[in-house]
Amino acid sequence: MFKILRDMLRYNVEFAIGFVLTLSIFLFALAHFWAPLPDTAIYLLPPDMPPSAQYWFGTTSRGQDVLWQMSSAIWNTMLFGLTVTVLSRLLAVAVGMLSGYLGGRWDQALMTLNDTMIALPNIPILLLVYFVMRDSMSWPVLAATAALLGWNYDARLIRSVTLSLRNREFTRHAVFAGMSVPQILVRQHLPYVMPVIFFTAMNNLIWAIGLEVTLSVLGFSDINRPTIGGMIYWANQHQAIIAGIWWWIAFPIIAIVLLFLGLFLLAISVNEYIDPRSRLSRMGA
Amino acid sequence: MSALLELQNVNKDYRIGGFFDSATLRAVKNVSFTLDSSKPEIFTIVGESGSGKTTTARMILGNEAPTSGTLRFMGQDIAAIHSRADRLKFMARAQPIFQNPFEAFNPLTTIDYFLFSTAKRFLGLRDKAAVDAATDKALNHVGLSLAEVRGRYSHELSGGQLQRIAVARALIPEPKLIVADEPVSMVDASLRMSIVNLFRDLRDRLGVSIIYITHDLSTAYYISDRVIIMHRGDVVEAGVAQEVLGNPQHPYSRALSQAVLPPDPEAARKIIMAKIQ
Amino acid sequence: MLNTLQAPTTTDSVLRVEGLKAYYQMNYFGVRREVRAVDDVSLTINRNEIYGIAGESSSGKSSLIKTIAGAITPPLRVVEGSVKFDFGGRALDVYADPQAMKAARWQNLSYIMQGSMNVLNPVRRVKHAFHDFAFKHMGISQSAFRSRVEQHLHRIGLDPRVLESFPHQLSGGMRQRLTIALATVCEPDFIIADEPTTALDVLVQQDVLALIKDIQQRMGASIIFVTHDMTVHAAIADRIGIVYAGRLVEEGPTLDVFRRPQHPYTAHLISSLPRIGDNKKRSALPGKPPNLADPPSGCRFHPRCPLAVDKCRSENPPLVVRQTGRVACWRAGEVQAA
């Protein structure tokens, strides 16, 4: 593992940049555990202070330090995004691989479900869930709901990969070697599906974070818990742009753009590394 | 005499075309033959692409059900095998060898996984030493050893070696029948003979019957005991290999045998020059 | 009839390959690999000659032919040596002058490819393929081009009506004949063919070979082709070059190579060919083909060679003229045709 990391840092510029970017943002987000003030506290600092030596990124109109707000916000937004991504990847892999490998009635049933889910509009469903759940709405519930909405396109993609693998000779050979369906899927097919998982994970993460931002900006989430979207929501509420409090909006947006960039670079370089063709070349095929 | 494998009037239809205008293609027509369990042999099915030879092989292995007719393996109707336990029992007795040795093993996983899986599942072995011993024994039959194969990936070995390992894997459960679909068409000429000789050896030494499927008449002549020639789903000629291939009677078998270029420049050139005139 | 077995009497060459080295150079995350697919090959092909290159998969024969055609893409690179054509006084150095190479394509130099379906677009009629490949090289009007194509098809025994059909309506043999027609419609001086009959059914193989031979004789073109199938070489090649592990190990007139192989590898290739009417046991070559990323020292065949001595393990035998051909073996005189 360490050797792989070292090789990738040394030989792949995209990976090195992506790694440094993501790592610094992660460390920055991690720092919120040592924040001097609780992140939900308001009006403890002088409001509307521009960036200075004391408040690096300025303060908000609600009397919060933008630096520490951002630290918490990135942490919470990432947590939400990653939860959605992991859950939806699990669903996509399970449905896609089973559907592609088993075929027949299983395939028909799973793909009917899949296509029905694709037809559902995301935002209205989430709003519906929000109105039904009301007070018991928390970020894990929102993440689970988003995960349920975010796997279907990728399940189709994974299904098509598995479908082509199913017709390869080594799959038939594996059956005659007595391997069970889980063994075939996990040991034989998963290495080919991994690049798809990684690549769609990236897309999905961006989608999930975007969804969180959208819902927060609209005010449909726990607005007291700092998130990137939540920060933008409060900045809008206080008409930060008109009032010239640009740092309240600019820094969260720069942070999220850098995070996307870092993750994107990581995703494409890792993808190149785990791609079967590149793997085979390195092994000397 | 008891039959190892018995095909009776086996037919296979495929529906081709769209939903509204479909036609049936009869890929295999009325094929019957019997392999005797007391007399192991190399039984060859010769045919070109589209002759139905691969479909027949798939039916024998239970990958495809016949449209009509029956295939019995050691008295059991192959198409009636449904449960996983029965299927495993059948696979322990009848094993396949595939066409492309590079495709038969997953390029991204080590080859020994296939061997160990076979030993665990079909021999019911749990103990690692016993699994290794069974695998090594099978590899010894093909002139290899576990030490040479353990931890290797398919690209580290030649096509001939891989095909021998594929044969060894098939031998682990000590099957009665091996179905080899074009096993040498992707193997280099210098290694081809080693596979073909291996089949002879398995028949004589281990008493395994082999169904050898090929389009290549010269290797068919070289190793077969009996042969059937298939053309568009029909068996056009059947019998003892040396007689059928040495002196074909049916026009199609004759055309097929004349289409084989002799490995001799003078004779081959005469055939080509005659075609030009 | 047998005079076709002799090498052509005209000695002027159309292709001269000198000291050609083409390597696959790869670098993935610090894993550097160099595969010497073509390693110091020199050969000459005469006008009006069919030259067959034989060898096993991954012996470098396909890389050799790609390098000769100037159709290589990274990671395969020419490291050393030259490929020079001479089209009736018009000289062309493939790796010195890519522009001239482009101009010569199809008109002087054409290809017969292996999978005919890869050449003929499955959703367009066959006539479009002719138009796409050959029209701009001929410099004649549309209608003149059309009649030229029809004339050409007629000459090689194909019904010009096939031009109006889609590839899937034609049989594999017919499609391969069309790709041959496509490669020869401009009457090139030199044709390169990669496994021209491998994907074909046995029954049409002879007809396709006869077609290639017939066109070559009538147009007086030179052909270089690659196949692993020795019987195809026996049928149409005037001379054969045997490639083993990226090197040319033997070359000579077809009949001589088959009757009196001088390299132990060639001898084995020929003796292991099974034939109908003879099922005496044939031996197989031991060992495995060499890894071109890490080839054996000395003669690359020595680990599998029954005649190998110490010298073979340490010193690489040069390709030297011997009898009617050339051979690279320290013990060439002692090889027995089995």
Image: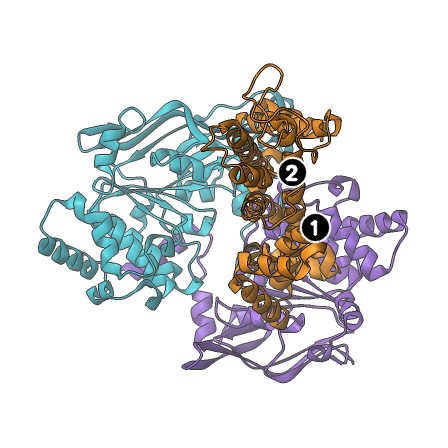
Note whether A240 is above or below A142 in the view shown: above
Q: Secondary structure at mark 2?
A: loop
Other residues around mark 1 within 10 Å, as few (<14) / some (14–19) / many (≥20): few
User: Can you tell which quarter of the image residue B120 is in?
Assistant: bottom right
| Disc ID at residue A138 | 1
At 58% from the left and 70% from the top, the residue drawn is: A108
Q: Position of residue C319 (x, y in %)?
A: 46, 26
Q: Are marks 2 and 1 on the same chain?
A: yes
Q: Chain of mark 1?
A: A
* Whole-percent x, y for residue B121 in the image: 81, 59
Point 15% across, 58% down: residue: C151
| Left or right: C148 in relation to B80 | left
Q: Is residue A219 above or below residue A5?
A: below
Quarter of the image for residue B172 reads bottom right
Residue type at mark 2: give it.
Answer: Pro
Give me the chain that's purple.
B
Q: How many marks?
A: 2
Which chain is depicted cyan? Answer: C
The residue where tag 2 is placed is: A226
Q: Quadrant of residue C49?
A: top left
User: Dot 2: few (<14), some (14–19), or many (≥20) neighbours within 10 Å?
Assistant: many
> Which of the marked residues, 2 or 1, is nearer the chain's N terminus?
1
Q: Nearer the viewer, residue B130 or B15?
A: B15
* Figure quadrant of the C terminus of chain C: top right
> Can residue C141 be spotted in the picture?
yes
Chain in orange on the image: A
Amino acid type of the residue that numbered disc 1 sits on in the rendered structure: Ser
Residue B17 locus on image (x, y percent): 43, 76
- Cα separation, mark 2 vs mark 1, equals 13 Å
Please state if B101 lies on the left or on the right of C246 as rendered: right
Task: Locate residue A20, reporting x and y percent.
Answer: 60, 25
Q: Secondary structure at mark 1?
A: loop
